[in-house]
Amino acid sequence: MSPLCLTHADGTTTTLRNRLLMGSMHTGLEELPDGWDRLAAFYAERAEGGVGLIVTGGLSPNREGNMWPGMRTLDSEESASPHRAITTAVHAHGAHIVIQLLHAGRYATHAEGVAPSALRSPISPATPREMSVEDIRRTISDYTQAAILAQSVGYDGVEIMGAEGYLINQFMAPRANQRNDEWGGSLENRIRFGVETVRQVRAATRSDFIVIFRLSMLDLVEGGCTWDEVVEMAKAVAVAGASIINPYVGWHESRVPTIATLVPRGAFTGLTRRLKSELDVPVVASNRINDPRLAEQILAQDGADLVSMARPLLADPMLLNKFASGQSALINTCIACNQGCLDEAFSGRLTTCMVNPRACRETELRIEPTAEPKRIAVVGAGPGGLAFAVTAAQRGHQVTLYDAASVVGGQFNLARLIPGKEEYSETLRYFSAELVRHGVKQRLGERASSESLLKAGFDHVVLATGVVPRRLTWPGIDHPRVLRYADVIEGRAPVGARVAIVGAGGIGFDVAELLSHEHLEGDELAQFTATWGIDLKGQNPGGMTEPHPARMRRELWLLQRRPDSLGKGLGKTTGWIRRALLRRRGVNMLSGVIYERFDDEGLHITVGGVTKILPVDHVVICAGQESERPLLGELERAGQPVSLVGGALMAGDLDATRAIDEGVRLACRL
Ligand code: NAP
């Protein structure tokens, strides 16, 4: 990627070594007592990996603006000075770094929250206090003070968060701003807060201090801004002194997915190009860009001046260097699952990455050469087994990987067949390339026996044999029209027009998504925007339009025994999407179900004391998993050192995040 030269108002320039911007992510390290060194290591690894410009996670310029109690702010010399560890570490690798200033406004989860108007957001626990004019002026001055502090500790600039429904965005949109003074009402008044913040930050800092403005390009909420208003705002902040405009799509309270895996790659880049054509300052493309080839394409076609990636740099800090050196097959691609990152962050836990457990654990989880190379057998080539095999081989162990299947991947081979989860193939491509690179001997299509393992005389055996579907026992369970989920997902079992899915966990939802999926007219992007009601032409306020999801041709029931609503155990930031999708398609969701039997009439169930028959052609069993560890007893009795990872260790609460994490950690210990 070519460099980008920013020319400042006084004619001086800053050259970014390339056009990859690492987007802002709050990691949770910010609040830890030893967080500064860990953050420094986290950012330094990404700087070493080739990123040109890093944006840190957001910090508020005052306490009222914190998202939750106990967050760090940037409001004093004392709060600023530890940041030197970060800026020094990043500069040592030749990258630039700016700090994001984020005031939560009405998204604050504490009682001191403030906002343009006293309107509670649908996702907030508290109603904010309406800001007085004095509050507004003081807050702008707090932003300015924070920028001066950032400059004093070595940051190359700030990013002012004006998107995602946070305070500045709240001032902009009638949805959250119902003021009738000079800070509300007309567009000029609504954008005044953001524009004035940029103007004062610009005036108070060095002329080569980078001021990025994160702009909400498409609010995706009722009462959001129109496209013309967005363009006016972008022009006004550019005139006020913004060096770069970094557009984003959606508010946190939007009920439209914008970065989950089912969002097509680069879905919003057409809009970015349109915005860029209106502006003279550099513009960034973001949202679901996870492949440097796509980034290059956007830049080459003049769709943006920089490309932002955030989660992809959690997944692989060396992404750009690998791309630049022609090693794209070795990139550990972000699959936008959100399981390790956003789900954790929004649960108040430390961010990580499902496919890279080292993310945010750089100082603790080190992959170092072993002093005692061992001969290790790994049985099972699912995510946990693969993660172990690759990491152990990388450390210098001699690893042989067995799997009864002829391909690696285990349950990921099912996940990647679900419409909207195609990205899971990338993880298997990455692991396959790493197996070859690190010389792992692959014995695929071979069911390892305890005799063969013992005979081979391995120093250690790792059982990553995963899980088997739970066997149910009600009458009719062996009927030929009762199907295994793997047969359905892999297309081995024809499925009729009326289907009941027993079990509504991760796999039940996957099967429901597969069986309810219908192709709409048009390409992937057209289907996505029609399903979710997104107006990419910018004709409607907030970019919202009437959704036109494809109604499924089947009749589908998704069932669970628990009385609570379905999908509660799904990911915190993606579960709502999956529930909404099935609702839009017309899937019947029933909880509190007692299964009685299946026969030629259909599935007999009792719900709320009423017995009924679902007249279905097929039932698909997705009733959870049990551990599969057939070799353990014999190996242990023979004195073979054995370890377990993933589902073989514990089937309950299994997910790939845990399996991969366990695989990597075990490989670092052995
Ligand atoms: P799961 O998430 O534990 O769900 C099992 C489902 O089966 C539950 O709905 C449960 O609900 C039902 N069930 C349990 N025992 C039953 C019984 N005896 N009779 C009838 N129903 C029974 O398991 P899974 O769906 O197999 O998923 C396996 C793992 O893969 C999960 O940990 C999941 O996180 C992961 N996964 C995740 C995703 C994802 O998108 N994040 C997708 C696929 C898989 P009731 O007990 O209320 O009936």
Image (tube, rainbow, N blue to C red):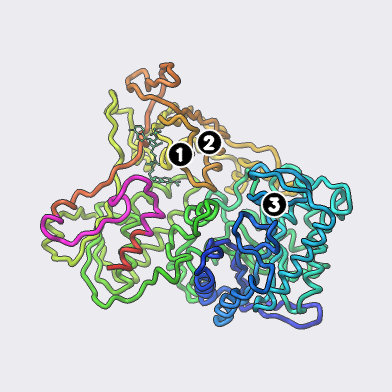
Residue 10 vertical placement versus 174 (above, below): below
Q: How far apart are labels 3 and 2 at the CA level?
A: 38 Å
Picture quadrant of residue 268: bottom right
Which residue appears at 72% of the width and 64% of the height?
213
Ligand 1 closer than 8 Å to label 1 CB: yes
Q: What is the span of residues highlighted in magenta in the rendered image?
A: 635-661
The stretch drawn in magenta includes residue 656: yes
Indicate which disc, 3 or 2, sits on the residue closer to the N terminus.
3
User: Which of the numbered marks, if any, corresponds to residue 582?
Assistant: 2
Numbered tag placed on residue 509 in the rendering: 1
In the picture shown, does residue 253 fall above or below 26? above
Residue at position x 41%, y 63% in the image: 430
Q: Which residue is mark 3?
A: 112
Relative horizontal placement of residue 669, taking residue 456 as reference (left or right):
right
- Quick one: SS at disc 3? loop
Mark found first going from the N terminus, 1 or 2: 1
Is residue 604 within the magenta segment? no
Closer to the eye: label 3 or 1: 3
Q: Which mark is residue 238?
A: none
Residue 555 spot, x, y in % from top left: 48, 27
Residue 645 visible in this rendered orientation of the protein: yes
